[in-house]
Amino acid sequence: MRVDLHTHSTASDGTLTPAELMLAAEAVGLDVIALCDHDTTGGWDEAAAALPAGLSLVRGAELSCSYSGRACRGAGLDGAISMHLLAYLFDRAEPALADERSRVRQSRLARGRLIVERLRADGVEVSWDEVLSDAAGGTVGRPHVARALLRRGYVADLDAAFGPDWVGTHGRYWAGKEETDARAAVGLVRAAGGVTVLAHPAAGKRGRTLGDEAIADLAAAGLSGLEVEHVDHTEADRRHLAGLAADLGLVTTGSSDFHGTNKTTRLGAHLTDPDAYGTLVAPATGCAVVTG
Ligand code: AMP
Ligand code: ZN
Ligand code: FE
Ligand code: FE
């Protein structure tokens, strides 16, 4: 059984539509795929309607959160650490969590516009209209700005756009967005019947990452798992996180974090152990896994 628990579609910053993503999942031999677009459930219905026979869909989202508190790796800087929380099988109609997703998406719009205004003020010819139309109603993110920079020839590839001279974290044209407090988010998802997994906990190239104490703190708040197998993790990261998960009684997952052509990782590049998958989803009551 092949289980990939973290993918993106055009409902956020992936390049395949939800329906195309389901067909791609079948083509690479997945049995289970989780759709985890940033701060939205906007792709759920199209994905469910397009499910090929035998493929199971775990409906989810990747929530933009920030953690403030306990010791964090990469000391020396104060303030909260931005992080991503994978939420699965929650009730999308539950109002507190739905309001929070909406608030973060609104903030992403304002922040995207601000980034474009700053670029334009420096003579960089990208327009907010083209960024917004590229996002096509999905959650707006830096990848959409990066794609505009690439189309206009300002950068050679998307990686360069995510460098310090452009929209990379704390780079020249970076701007922050509103995020949900991580402990609160874990509680909101649980209250909506879902379960949570900390996404790419050791992906240091995106900025500072949580230390073990902070992860233990989230575990105490009700976190269910750690995403261990991920393209941005070294072998040493994976060993460390697997040990930490064992200590804290957390499930470990593996996933591709597939974004279509916006990233180089292939669908199904990393997988979750079927037993770990079963343990993770068993307590969820917010919505069902749907099978085509
Ligand atoms: P945002 O959520 O708007 O802050 O944008 C961050 C998103 O950009 C991440 O979730 C990744 O999907 C994507 N990203 C980060 N670094 C890169 C990169 N080097 N190349 C392509 N996409 C990236
Ligand atoms: Zn993304
Ligand atoms: Fe992420
Ligand atoms: Fe992701």
Image: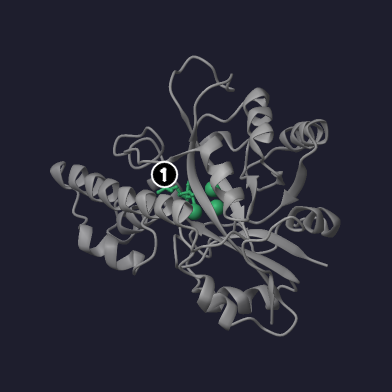
Using residue 82 as the reference point, say whether residue 186 is left or right of it: right
Q: Residue furthest bottom?
A: 53
Which amino acid type is marked by label 1? Phe
Identify the secondary structure beneath mark 1.
Answer: loop
Q: Quadrant of residue 34?
A: bottom right
Say if residue 155 shows up in the picture.
no
Q: Residue furthest top?
A: 76
**Which residue lies at the image location 67% right of the left edge and 67% below the top edge?**
33
Residue 277, above or below 234: below
The quadrant in which the C terminus is found is bottom right
- For label 1, the residue is 162
Residue 236 in picture, x, y percent from top left: 75, 32
Classify 10 Å Cα crowding around label 1: few (below 14), some (14-19), many (20 and above): many
**Which residue lies at the image location 53% right of the left edge and 61% below the top edge?**
259
Say if residue 140 shows up in the picture.
yes
Looking at mark 1, is its residue's CB closer than 8 Å to ligand 1? yes
Using residue 56 as the reference point, say whether residue 49 is left or right of it: left
**Which residue lies at the image location 67% right of the left edge and 61% below the top edge?**
285
Residue 169, above or below 104: above
